[in-house]
Image (spheres, rainbow, N blue to C red):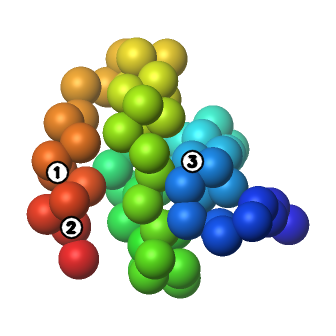
């Protein structure tokens, strides 16, 4: 279980990283999976940038904003 105050940014970012590492999903696919089950998910732009840099995936934050 992963939790934080609102469950929108920090815990979602951690869950995305876990799916990336364990399930070998791309960051965008991991985001979609989390968003499917928790629609209010929206990692903070700085956290998303950090994930992209760490995993060397160049996915603009604007892509997240466009995903439903």
- The total number of labels drawn is 3
Q: CA distance from mark 1 to mark 2?
A: 6 Å
User: Is the residue marked by circle 3 packed among few (<14), some (14-19), or many (20+) residues within 10 Å?
Assistant: many
Q: Residue furthest front?
A: 5
Q: Which mark is residue 13?
A: 3
How far across and down, in percent of the image, does residue 55 sit? 46, 22
Residue at 17% across, 51% down: 63
How far across and down, in percent of the image, does residue 17 sit? 60, 41
How far across and down, in percent of the image, does residue 44 sit? 44, 45
Nearer-the-camera pick, 23 or 27? 27
How far across and down, in percent of the image, does residue 46 sit? 42, 31
Give the SS element for disc 1.
helix
**Residue placed under numbered mark 2 in the picture:** 67
Q: CA distance from mark 3 to mark 1?
A: 15 Å
Residue at 23% across, 35% down: 59
Q: CA distance from mark 3 to mark 2?
A: 16 Å
16 lies above or below 42: above
Answer whether labels 1 and 2 touch (C-beta < 8 Å). yes
Q: Which mark is residue 63?
A: 1
């Amino acid at each position: 279980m992963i939790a934080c105050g609102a469950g929108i940014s920090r815990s979602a970012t951690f869950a995305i990283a876990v799916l990336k590492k364990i399930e070998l999903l791309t960051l965008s696919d991991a985001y979609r999976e989390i968003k499917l089950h928790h629609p209010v998910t929206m990692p903070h732009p700085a956290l998303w940038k950090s994930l992209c840099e760490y995993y060397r995936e160049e996915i603009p934050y604007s892509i997240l904003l466009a995903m439903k």
